[in-house]
Structure formats: structure tokens, C-alpha cells
Amino acid sequence: MKYNCIVILGPTASGKTKLACALAAQINGEIISADSRQVYKHLDIGTGKDLEEYVVNGKSIPYHLINCCEPEEQFYLHQFVAELKTSFGQIRARQHVPIICGGTGLYLDALSKDFSFTQIKEDEDLRKELSVLPKEELIQRLQKFPEQLRAHVDLNSVKRLIRGIEVAEYRSKNPELTRAEALPYKPLYIGVQVSAEDRKAKITQRLKLRLEHGLIEEVQQLLKKGLTHQRLETLGLEYKFVSHYLQQKISREELFTQLQTAIFQFSKRQMTWFRKMEKEGINIHWVESDVKLEHLINLFMERR
């Protein structure tokens, strides 16, 4: 198999973007973000867009799937799948190298799994029925479906469990739903490796900097633009906990400690997802964040 793109993955605060941009500058690469929150406009500090990193030695690195929609809108997986395919084709047509960079597991899975079923419309009646059920009961209900209808579902997320049941219900009643065309992606997977101890230290330092450099003010501006606290809750992590702080549900100290813990837990879930990818047959080349670019270029070129 010849590689036609590169994936740079890793847990939050591992230095993925910096590495991806440095590599892109060397090989005429363009970045496709695989981050489920960076698609939203105005969510800059909390999502760590760090757009200054997309300039390397005075050279601007083109990027895609960042700032695609307004934060009050919901960006769905099927939209990512479609935009990924479009961006990938455009980059390849320019004879540049697509570099997919991010840590959202479901988005990364779109490179190797058929997600054509994500275009299935929402069933509002079913959603109302499922929304009152505890996670354990949702899992039991999902497990009643055949493995091929539920293998993709993230069991840690109530939202994704509900969507998984919704999709499985539809597909079980519509067996004529066929596979989409073959996926065009042949990626070299590069994983940025960070020890658990270093990961926690980097997360803590980054969180301190974000709070010092306007995270709370960013959320206040989102509220002024009309975003609701309910929507901030669904955007998760930084936006959820700052929303709680602004509603005086938690103190400033609790904001830091609770958010820090939540990000630690999130990074562990990311690593669990990457290990799942490996168990499913994805070969991830794990490297340190300061790896020599020549090593990555050689890995990519040796099977082109």
C-alpha cells in the first residue's frame, strides 16, 4: 500500500499541531483538522486553535475544517466526512500532501470506516424516549443489535449512544442501505507520545495560560453574542466549566481544579481510543514531539 496522506494524532496538549505544521512546511502539506470543536468560529482559546502555529519560518500553512460554522449550530459527523473528502481531493489535486491532525477519535475513524450511515436523519420521537434513560440502559438497548450495527459507537458518551441506537434502528429496518464507495485515504499514522506524568504537567500549564489569557472573557463574549449556557454545556470542557463559574455554581478555584481533572480524564479517553484503533489493525508509529522531521518524511516516502 502506498501512503497518500499523513495522520498526526495524540492526546490533548501533546504538541500535535506544532509537529504537523513543521512537517507540512517541509513537504508542501496542508492541514485538515480532526478536532470536533475547532470547526466552530469564536471558540479559539478554549479549543486551542493556536493559529499562530500555522506560520512556520514566515510560511503560512493552509488549513481546513477550522472555523467552519457558528457555535450555535451543531456540526455533525456526516458534515465532517463530506468536508474531509472535499478537502482531501482539493489538496491532492494541487499535488500537496494532506496532513490530518487532531485527537477526536470518531473523526480519525472516518479515514478507515464507512460512515455513510451518518446521513440518517434524527428520529425525534425515539430521541425523547431515549433521553430519559440512564447510560447503562442505553448500552443494554444498543447491545440488542447485531455487532455490525453498533461496533462504531462510543459507549462513554450518552449523546453518541442515543445516536447509535437511532442509526441501528434505521439500518435494521432498511437493510438495503449499502456501503458507500471505497474510501480514498491511505494514511501513515504518526502518534505523538507523551508520558502520563508529562501529559498532566502540560495540561496544567496550558490551562493556567488559557485562564490568564482570556478564556473566561472568551466565554463572556460568546454569551453576549447570544450563545446559551445550555449550548456551552454541550460544547464541553472549558466552555462547560467556565459557564458553571459564570453562573456562580462553582468558585474560581473549583473552576481550575474541576476543569483540570476533566481534561485529565479526557486525555485518558483519547489514549483509550488510540489503543482501540491499534487493536482494530491501525499501525500507529509513536514518536516524541521533538522527533526529527527527516524520520517522518522517510517513513512517508518509503512507501509512496
Image (cartoon, rainbow, N blue to C red):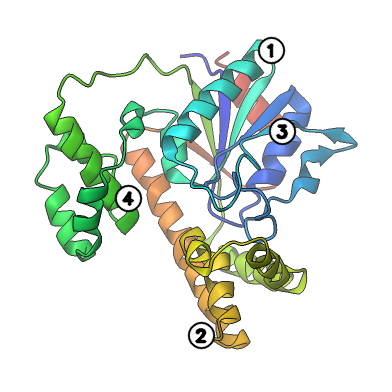
Residue 23 is marked as: 3
Nearer the camera: disc 3 or disc 4:
4
**Which amino acid, mark 1?**
Gln
Residue 218 at x, y percent in the picture? 70, 65
In-image side of 19 versus 145 (left or right): right
Task: Please name the residue that numbered disc 2 is placed on.
Answer: 249
Task: Please name the residue that numbered disc 4 is placed on.
Answer: 160
Task: Please name the residue that numbered disc 1 is placed on.
Answer: 95
Q: Mark 1 and mark 3: span between their CA atoms?
A: 16 Å
- Does residue 275 appear anywhere in the picture? yes
- Residue 158: quarter of image: bottom left
Q: Earlier in the sequence, mark 2 or mark 1?
A: 1
**Which amino acid, mark 2?**
Lys
**Which amino acid, mark 4?**
Arg
Number of other residues with Cα within 10 Å of mark 2, as a class: few under 14, some 14 to 19, many 20 or more: few
- Residue 147: quarter of image: top left
